Structures are given as C-alpha cells and as structure tokens.
Amino acid sequence: MRYIITGGPGFGKTSIIKNLNKKGFPFVGESSRNLINELIEKEGKDPREDRNRFQILIVKKRIQDFFDNNQDIVFFDRGVFDEIAYSLFYQREPTDECKKFCKEHKYDKVFIVPPWKEIYKKDELRNESYEKAVALHNEIVKAYKETGHEILEIPKLTVEERVNYVLDKIKN
C-alpha cells in the first residue's frame, strides 16, 4: 500500500513521516530536496534555475520511487501528482511522462497537511512565502482531487497525534 503525505511546503509533512519511520514504517523522503542537494554538489548551482530540466528530473525520480517501493505499507513525502500542481503553479505544462503516469496509476490513500502558519518556516531550500506555500497547497489538493484520489486532511495537532491519526486511518 502506497500512502502519500502531502500539502504545501512547510506544513509538517516531513515531521509526520519521520515519526512514522521511528515506529518502523518505511518511507520515501522528499525527492526534490535530495535531488536539489545532489545536483548542487555535483554541478555547483541550484538546478531550479532551469525549471524545465528540474521538472523532468524530479518527475522521473518520483515515478522511479513509486515503482521501487511497493511494500505492504510505504509512506511517500510527496508524490508524482504533486508535480502536476507544481508545473501548473509555475505556469508550465506537466511533462508527458507525468500526465501518462497520472492517468494510469494512483496512490492508495492521500493525506494532506493543511496550511498552518504557526509552524511554517523557510529554510535553505524552502524559500516560498507563507502565502505562496498556501497557493501551492491549493494546487496540490486540486491535482489529487481531479485525479480521483480520496483526500484525508490531517488535523492540526501535535506530531504524535497526527501520526496516530494517520495510523488509525490506514487500519480502516
């Protein structure tokens, strides 16, 4: 079973996933962060400067992650459908590979973390303002809804309570 935890940047996805992992659940981390760091180290510049190239690379990575991870239960910090949202947000057409994947595949459950200003923080790779993060969040929700995914919004609670909410929902 493939479960997505997604939503706008900085709203608590990664904290939930790391805590699920501490409880023994496998996860696939935020592919774009890993790819950005890898390419900065390799090429000496931020790969997002060439948005089209970066989009192609991240879609390929997310699709590879999907097929490489089909254990009984695995959590993903974002998924392929997020790339539709990011493309549209940055006024680009999603890649053909992304559109094809999204027509043919789905995740088993999609958990969305809602915008939460009190916990939002910028960091070295997350440079969106809170308002831009909310706009991205709305595009992400739209992308999953329009592709027929059931969306479960994770309540604004402590990390442990959020983890318990997710675990309760995957048991049913």
Image: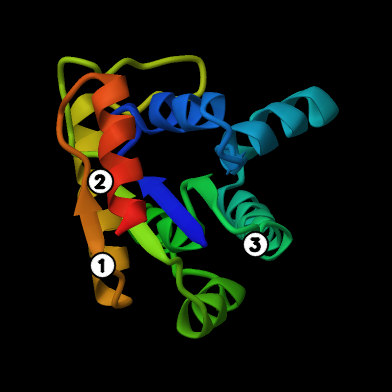
Residue denoted by label 3: 70
Q: Which quarter of the picture shows residue 161?
A: top left
Marks 1 and 2 close (CB-CB < 8 Å): no
Q: Please state the horizontal and vertical placement of residue 67, each as a whole percent of the image.
A: 69, 65
Is 83 on the left or on the right of 167, as rendered?
A: right
Q: Earlier in the sequence, mark 1 or mark 3?
A: 3
Q: Is residue 69 above or below residue 115?
A: below
Is 170 on the left or on the right of 119, as rendered?
A: right
**Residue most toward the front?**
171
- In 3D space, how far apart are the residues under numbered discs 1 and 2 (Cα atoms)? 16 Å
Residue denoted by label 1: 150
Q: Amino acid at mark 3?
A: Asn
Which residue appears at 54% of the width and 24% of the height? 22
Q: Earlier in the sequence, mark 2 or mark 3?
A: 3
Q: Please state the horizontal and vertical placement of residue 8, each as a whole percent of the image.
A: 30, 40
Q: Nearer the viewer, mark 1 or mark 2?
A: 1
Decide: few, some or many residues near mark 2? Use Cα within 10 Å; few <14, some 14-19, many ≥20. Answer: many
Q: Amino acid at mark 1?
A: Glu
**Secondary element at image label 3:** loop
Q: Please state the horizontal and vertical placement of residue 122, each as a whole percent of the image.
A: 36, 17
Residue denoted by label 2: 137
**Secondary element at image label 1:** loop
